[in-house]
Amino acid sequence: DTEVTQTPKHLVMGMTNKKSLKCEQHMGHRAMYWYKQKAKKPPELMFVYSYEKLSINESVPSRFSPECPNSSLLNLHLHALQPEDSALYLCASSQGELFGLTEAFFGQGTRLTVV
Amino acid sequence: QKEVEQNSGPLSVPEGAIASLNCTYSDRGSQSFFWYRQYSGKSPELIMFIYSNGDKEDGRFTAQLNKASQYVSLLIRDSQPSDSATYLCAALDSGGYQKVTFGIGTKLQVIP
């Protein structure tokens, strides 16, 4: 199993809604990441979890709240988002703490639309 | 601000030709570099990583790194229409070993 699975694939939410994005991997990877990608832009790092602890928060607004319940699961809780938060949200995992240096995989992403 | 620069393209090459994709980076301390392929609407897929000066070959792909010039390239030999995608260059930040800065990506079109 070399997959990072993200659910849902598409999400439309209102600005007052609370929703969560889910990411799961069963490759034994110990680092997991959330990236945000807007159209025709590169992925931008949001959060990094290493051994289930938050190691990097790229000054992301508090309306985005990450959670790592266990080594296989990564959530992103969303609350009071703005239309400009509409983007493709990508989860990734890597075998070690060096992203991409060995085996690193992205999930298929959740396309989020905030209305 | 650490940056990775790429020409957004599109770069058009005929089928069977060599596609050459280039990238420069600003963080002189970066040690590891990656090429990702991203099809439209899909997630990035790691093609190659390189951390030593020189060439690294994997099948039809060759990555080239020149740290003195802060330059990374990707050559795709015998280009196929299925290679048509956006290719993202990325560099591992020197200050944070888990942070990777991506370039905007070069859109490659392989013409049959």
Image (cartoon, grey):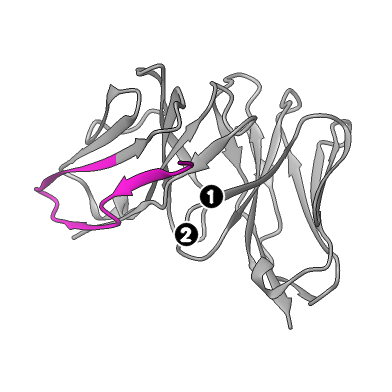
Question: Total label count?
Answer: 2
Quarter of the N terminus of chain B within the rendering: top right
What is the x, y in percent for residue A37?
Answer: 44, 50
Which residue lies under the disc numbered 1? A42
Specify the amino acid type for callout 1.
Answer: Pro
Which residue type does callout 2 highlight?
A: Lys
Image quadrant of residue A86?
bottom left
Let me know if residue B78 appears in the view: yes
Is there one chain holding both mark 1 and mark 2? no
Q: Secondary structure at mark 2?
A: loop
Magenta-drawn stretch contains A15:
yes
Give the residue pinned by disc 2.
B42
Residue at screen point 51% across, 66% down: B40
Q: Position of residue B13 (x, y in %)?
A: 79, 74
| Image coordinates for residue A17, horizontal then vertical, percent | 10, 48
Which range of residues does the magenta coloring cover?
Answer: A1-22
Asked if residue A59 lies left or right of residue A15, the reply is right
Quadrant of the rendering where the C terminus of chain B is positioned: bottom right
Relative side of B69 to B29, left or right: right
* Vertical position of residue B86 compared to residue B53: above or below: below
Question: Does B80 appear in magenta?
Answer: no
Q: Residues within 10 Å of mark 1 (few under 14, many from 20)?
A: some
Q: Residue furthest left?
A: A16
